């Protein structure tokens, strides 16, 4: 059904929405917060989720996501290519995460934190008995993720949890395609080893 | 294709990263070869396992308000003096999220701008300058286009008027703060009549409601800009005299801040010229001017 009344003018709707989008970006660049929100709102969940798999901490990922959007808002003027809005935003998120991880490493230098303990403290919320196995598995996966080095975790998260292409991962991280291919392969191998008990085969 | 050729490509094939001719070759082999098919299925099973770990972080209802608030806090962050103005501009900011330009909002910006200018005048007078000096400077630095330049016969007694204007403005600012700025016509009228009742609003410094209404938003913005420019010119003179008293590190810190603000002023002015009638652009420009006035005042008081 031709709800829009535009079936006979292909592209008309696309053009109109493109204009509207450009107008929104122009407004956001001038500091219009509402326009900024309209453009970036749809990335809220992906950005939070990306950060979540990087830091394995629910509250922290919400905080860092907020910081990501504040930075994006302040540096929107530096965005050159508007078609790369999403990779640009994830690039900012990546920087925010790296800074946070660096800071927490510094904090942890004196007090060696056991990941296991941290995760147990965090996971105290009540859940139905049937979910216990899932929770156990989730905890193992998050531990395995945390054991990957930062580059590998970054690439693995972008590929597996964000379904990004190698090219996009390269735009976000600045890594070369060969490095991405190589690190992803090794990350998968390490994850496989960590989680072999759940994969039901010997590797 | 043989298994030795296929196996290293299975992962890229799984990721959808292989180019056209290769995709077909690998696909063909994987459907025919049990060993390579197993490799592919392992990747699938692993992926499924990883995805069972769900992200339980959520978008809090206040998420975007928090982003907004934090961005606003960081964009107007400045030492000491800014606190009062910070609140004032935070109020403006929330009013300005309305997309349409309203004369009411412009009027409130102009009130703030005039208030700051009056504060600057008081400062200069309190530093032992004569009203005439201040007047001469302000007339010299303001462009003739400024609509509110006083008639020659009003120049005498301007000093007194400025002082009372400051008192009046403080009241108004306090009131504006309390109300988070005038939000509608009635409140604006109330503010206006408050000042008029006190008799503290000299015609030369403060416009009546009717006068404000007669001007277009652009005129009001231009007028506010002129007020700021005059204030900045006056302050800059004082600063250049005080500069030698600052230690070099402090002086450099101030210089850097000023340079940054000047860049912001340039950018925002361009935005205002390119988008006349855009309240956001105007707000940012006037905020940048106010910030410069703040910093200059702080330099003198340092
Ligand atoms: Zn094979």
Image: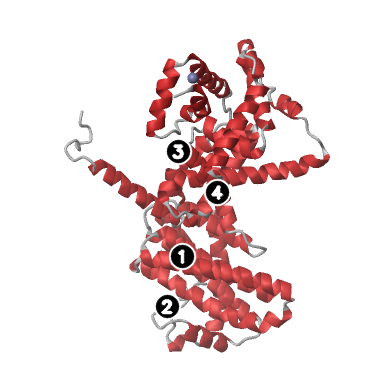
Between disc 2 and disc 3, the foreground one is 3
Name the residue beneath numbered marker 2.
B148
Q: Residues within 10 Å of mark 4 (few under 14, many from 20)?
A: many
- Of circles 3 and 1, the one toward us is 3
Would residue A180 be found to the left or right of residue A114 on screen? left
Q: Which residue is mark 4?
A: A70
Tag 1 and tag 4 share a subunit: no
Q: Nearer the viewer, residue B276 or A113?
A: A113
Q: Secondary structure at mark 3?
A: helix
Q: Quadrant of the N terminus of chain B?
A: top left
Left or right side of A181 for B104: left
- Chain bearing mark 3: A
Disc 1 to disc 4: CB gap under 8 Å: no
Considering every residue shown, the one lying at the far top of the view is: A130
Circle 2 chain: B
CA–CA distance between discs 4 and 2?
39 Å
Indicate yes or no: mark 2 CB to ligand 1 under 8 Å: no
Q: Which residue is mark 3?
A: A42
Q: Viewed as shown, does residue A148 lie left or right of B8? A: right
Residue B268, numbered label: 1
Considering only vertical position in the picture, is B172 above or below B7? below
């Amino acid at each position: 059904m031709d709800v829009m009344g535009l079936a006979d003018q292909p592209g008309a709707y696309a053009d109109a929405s493109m204009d509207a989008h450009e107008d929104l970006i122009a407004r956001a660049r001038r500091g219009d917060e509402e326009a900024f929100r309209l453009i970036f709102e749809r990335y809220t969940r992906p950005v939070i989720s990306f950060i979540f798999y990087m830091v394995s901490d629910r509250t922290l990922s919400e905080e860092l996501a907020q910081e990501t959007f504040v930075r994006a808002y302040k540096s929107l003027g530096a965005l050159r290519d508007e078609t790369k809005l999403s990779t640009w935003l994830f690039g900012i998120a990546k920087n925010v995460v790296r800074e946070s991880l660096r800071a927490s490493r510094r904090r942890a230098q004196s007090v060696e934190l056991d990941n296991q303990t941290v995760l147990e403290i965090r996971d105290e919320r009540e859940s139905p008995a049937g979910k216990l196995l899932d929770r156990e598995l989730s905890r193992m996966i998050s531990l395995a993720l945390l054991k990957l080095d930062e580059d590998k975790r970054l690439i693995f998260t972008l590929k597996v949890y964000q379904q990004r292409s190698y090219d996009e991962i390269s735009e976000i991280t600045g890594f070369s395609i060969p490095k991405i291919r190589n690190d992803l392969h090794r990350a998968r191998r390490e994850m496989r080893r960590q989680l072999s008990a759940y994969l039901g085969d010997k590797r | 294709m043989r298994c030795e050729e296929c196996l290293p490509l299975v992962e890229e094939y799984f990721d959808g990263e292989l180019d056209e001719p290769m995709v077909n070759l690998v696909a063909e082999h994987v459907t025919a070869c049990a060993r390579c098919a197993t490799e592919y299925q392992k990747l699938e099973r692993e992926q499924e396992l990883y995805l069972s770990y769900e992200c339980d972080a959520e978008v809090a209802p206040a998420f975007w308000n928090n982003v907004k608030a934090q961005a606003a806090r960081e964009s107007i962050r400045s030492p000491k003096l800014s606190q009062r103005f910070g609140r004032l501009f935070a109020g403006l900011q929330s009013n300005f999220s309305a997309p349409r330009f309203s004369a009411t909002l412009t009027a409130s910006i102009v009130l703030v701008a005039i208030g700051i200018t009056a504060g600057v005048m008081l400062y200069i007078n309190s530093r032992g300058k004569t009203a005439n000096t201040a007047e001469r400077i302000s007339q010299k630095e303001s462009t003739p286009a400024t609509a509110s330049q006083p008639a020659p016969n009003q120049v005498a007694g301007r000093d007194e008027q400025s002082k009372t204007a400051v008192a009046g403005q403080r009241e108004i600012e306090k009131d504006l703060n309390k109300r988070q700025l005038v939000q509608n016509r009635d409140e604006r009228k109330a503010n206006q009549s408050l000042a008029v009742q006190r008799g503290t609003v000299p015609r030369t410094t403060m416009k009546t409601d009717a006068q404000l209404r007669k001007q277009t938003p652009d005129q009001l913005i231009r007028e506010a800009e002129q007020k700021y420019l005059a204030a900045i010119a006056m302050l800059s003179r004082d600063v250049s005299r005080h500069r030698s008293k600052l230690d070099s590190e402090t002086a450099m810190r101030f210089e850097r801040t000023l340079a940054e603000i000047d860049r912001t002023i340039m950018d925002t002015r361009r935005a205002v010229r390119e988008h006349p009638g855009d309240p956001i652009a105007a707000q940012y420009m006037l905020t940048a001017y106010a910030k410069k006035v703040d910093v200059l005042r702080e330099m003198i008081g340092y």
